[in-house]
Image (cartoon, rainbow, N blue to C red):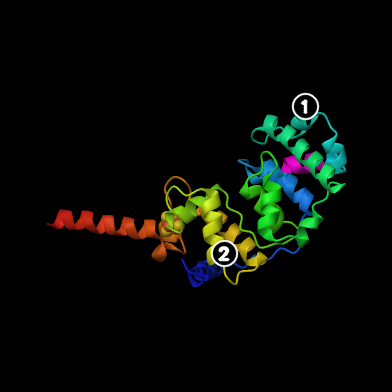
Amino acid sequence: MQAADLRSIQDRLAAQFGRIRVEERFDPVTQFVGSFLGSRTYDQVSRNALAKLMRRYPVWDALADAPEADIEAVITGVKYPEKKAPDLKRALRKIRALMGAINLDFLADWPVEEGLSWLEQNHGVGRKIAAATLNFSSLRKPAFVVDTHVLRVLRRFDFVGANALAENAYDAVMAAADGFDADDLFELHWHLKGLGQEACPHERPRCVSCPLSDICLQRVEEGARMVMRVSDCVA
Ligand code: SF4
């Protein structure tokens, strides 16, 4: 898919849902922690867990030095707290050991691909967390965040193959996003996620109300199948 096509998808979604521009962002470490908690977890649940974590540990050094069982108790409610608690603690300690402080501001000067690779070296950190740290935070770097909703829409749309992984979708969008800045990618993520949650859920997509219905492969194929069924009946 070409950049113009991606832009037209963005414009259709913006026409339907409005433009999204968010000036206030978390600092990169807070976003990193929030995205860590948000893996496979509803947004509201992870937001609550992040708020509890920040109240319990007002500085990130306190979290890095806290017993794992205590962290796990604070973040209870998110998915896999027993894995996230030690992984989070280990990641923060690693940042401190390597950089002298728990601070990710240095990533502002790094190329996106290097920043992603550095973050993904932490256990439990995949492309989604790494890209969210770079794009959603005050770093505002051009990296596209692919979650399960975004991936489902991109697959149905045939933007990526039916078995594509989040990393494949990241590569496909970034390759087609010539001319997109960090804010455009931020908006595209939230629009596609919203579409995946509302019109295009796992079960029974509501294509009739979807702003992409006339250019979506799944929709086009379903339309063709319906025409064939009707003509079978008529014949
Ligand atoms: S047309 Fe249907 S299948 Fe395609 S993206 Fe929209 S809701 Fe999903």
Q: Is residue 41 above or below residue 113?
A: above
Residue type for callout 2: Phe
Q: Main secondary structure of the magenta part?
A: helix
Callout 2: CB less than 8 Å from ligand 1: no
Q: Is mark 1 within 8 Å of ligand 1?
A: no
Residue 199 on image: x %, y %? 48, 54
Q: Measuring 73% from the left and 48% from the top, which residue is drawn there? A: 32
- Structural crowding at the residue carrying mark 1, measured as other residues with C-alpha within 10 Å and reported as few (<14), some (14–19) or many (≥20): few
Helix, strand or loop status at disc 1: helix
- State the extent of the magenta-drawn residues as a range: 48-54
Whole-percent x, y for residue 53 in the image:
79, 39
Based on the picture, tell me whether residue 53 belongs to the magenta stretch: yes
**Residue 17 — which label?**
2
Which mark, by number, is residue 69? 1
Instruction: Give amino acid for label 1.
Output: Ala
Of 140 and 214, the residue lying toward us: 140
